[in-house]
Image: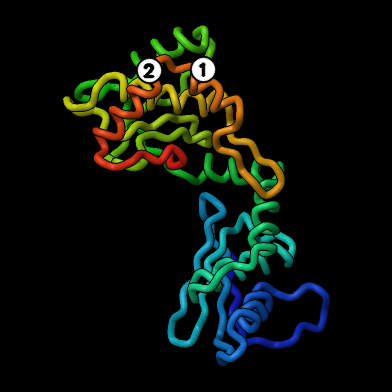
């Protein structure tokens, strides 16, 4: 962990320090505001998440140590994202584009994947719920739609009965987690089965990274999802169960 704290001063060399970068961005975003003190801390996070807060005329940045060796231009883009978010200003599109493009590079994605594996924690309850057994559902779908060839990841129920995130596949821990909301007497089998099928497609068709964009549901994914014979009925059952319109992008 590295902690750097300083007031703004002009660098005498090409590569400014993280503190200098953050304060230069602050001057660009808020040119009429007195320059505060600044502290930058690189932390052992399990992902690329970074945070900012303003406290006692001091800006405090907590940045993932996965970005400690990133080029100054990337730290500049991150500073724009964090500072603009703090002061509720629009992030310059070119800064967001540059930062996302960096995160989508193959070697960076690989390193972040390893961080999530080694530092992240995944609490898996196990496949057997009160009303449904996820392993039995997985095996049935695997036989019907994947010729039994899809390797089974860890399966479990979420801790909370989420109505928005009905399920997710975590590739770093190779786990499918289904919302506890679906392990209820009023959850029809078709709803549970379809959510599992959706997450199995995420196993079969991983997220695609192209440039600065990430395609969570690539073309092959969407085409395979249409093969589910009761797709319309399953989505209607989920809408009724959740009491809100589902958002497929969330899961």
Residue 175, how many percent across, how many down?
45, 30
Query: At 52% from the left edge and 7% from the top edge, which residue is drawn?
Result: 147
Q: How many marks?
A: 2
- Could you classify mark 1 by the number of other residues whose Cα lies within 10 Å: few (under 14), some (14-19), or many (20 or more)? few
Q: Is 163 located above or below residue 184 in the figure?
A: below
Q: Quadrant of residue 82?
A: bottom right
- Could you classify mark 2 by the number of other residues whose Cα lies within 10 Å: few (under 14), some (14-19), or many (20 or more)? few
Give whichever of discs 2 and 1 has the lower sequence position: 1
Residue 160 appears in the figure? no
Query: At 33% from the left edge and 41% from the top edge, which residue is drawn?
Result: 245
Q: Is 58 located above or below residue 119 in the figure?
A: below
Q: Is 52 located above or below residue 251 in the figure?
A: below
Q: Quadrant of residue 209?
A: top right
Residue 214 appears in the figure? yes
Give the residue at mark 1: 151
Say which of marks 2 and 1 sits in front. 2
Q: What scheme was used to colour the molecule?
A: rainbow
The answer to whether 188 appears left or right of 108 in the picture is: left
The answer to whether 239 appears left or right of 173 in the picture is: left
Q: Who is closer to the viewer here, 22 or 229?
A: 229
Residue 155, how many percent across, how many down?
38, 26
Q: Is 188 located above or below residue 97 in the figure?
A: above
Q: Quadrant of residue 92?
A: bottom right
The answer to whether 12 appears left or right of 205 in the picture is: right
Give the residue at mark 2: 230
* SS category of the residue bearing label 1: loop
* Distance between the alpha carbons at the discs numbered 2 and 1: 24 Å
Q: Quadrant of the C terminus?
A: top left
Q: Who is closer to the viewer here, 145 or 40?
A: 145
Query: At 71% from the left edge and 46% from the top edge, which residue is drawn?
Result: 211
């Amino acid at each position: 962990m590295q902690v750097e704290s300083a007031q703004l001063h002009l660098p005498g060399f090409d590569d400014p320090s993280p503190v200098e970068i953050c304060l230069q961005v602050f001057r660009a975003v808020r040119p009429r505001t007195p320059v505060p003190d600044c502290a930058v801390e690189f932390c052992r996070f399990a992902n690329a998440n970074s945070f900012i807060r303003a406290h006692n005329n001091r800006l405090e940045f907590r940045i993932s140590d996965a970005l400690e060796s990133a080029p100054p231009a990337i730290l500049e883009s991150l500073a724009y994202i964090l500072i603009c978010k703090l002061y509720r200003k629009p992030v310059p599109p070119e800064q967001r584009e540059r930062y996302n493009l960096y995160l989508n590079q193959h070697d960076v994605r690989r390193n972040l994947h390893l961080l999530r594996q080694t530092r992240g924690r995944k609490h898996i309850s196990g496949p057997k719920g009160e009303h449904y057994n996820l392993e039995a559902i997985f095996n049935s779908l695997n036989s019907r739609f994947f010729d039994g060839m899809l390797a089974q990841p860890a399966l479990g129920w979420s801790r909370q009965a989420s109505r928005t995130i009905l399920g997710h596949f975590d590739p770093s821990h190779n786990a499918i987690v289904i919302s506890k909301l679906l392990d209820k007497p009023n959850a029809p089998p078709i709803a549970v089965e379809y959510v599992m099928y959706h997450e199995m497609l995420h196993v079969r068709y991983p997220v695609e990274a192209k440039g600065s964009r990430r395609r969570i549901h690539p073309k092959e994914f969407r085409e395979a999802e249409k093969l589910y014979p009761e797709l319309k009925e399953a989505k209607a059952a989920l809408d009724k169960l959740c009491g809100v319109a589902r958002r497929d992008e969330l899961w």
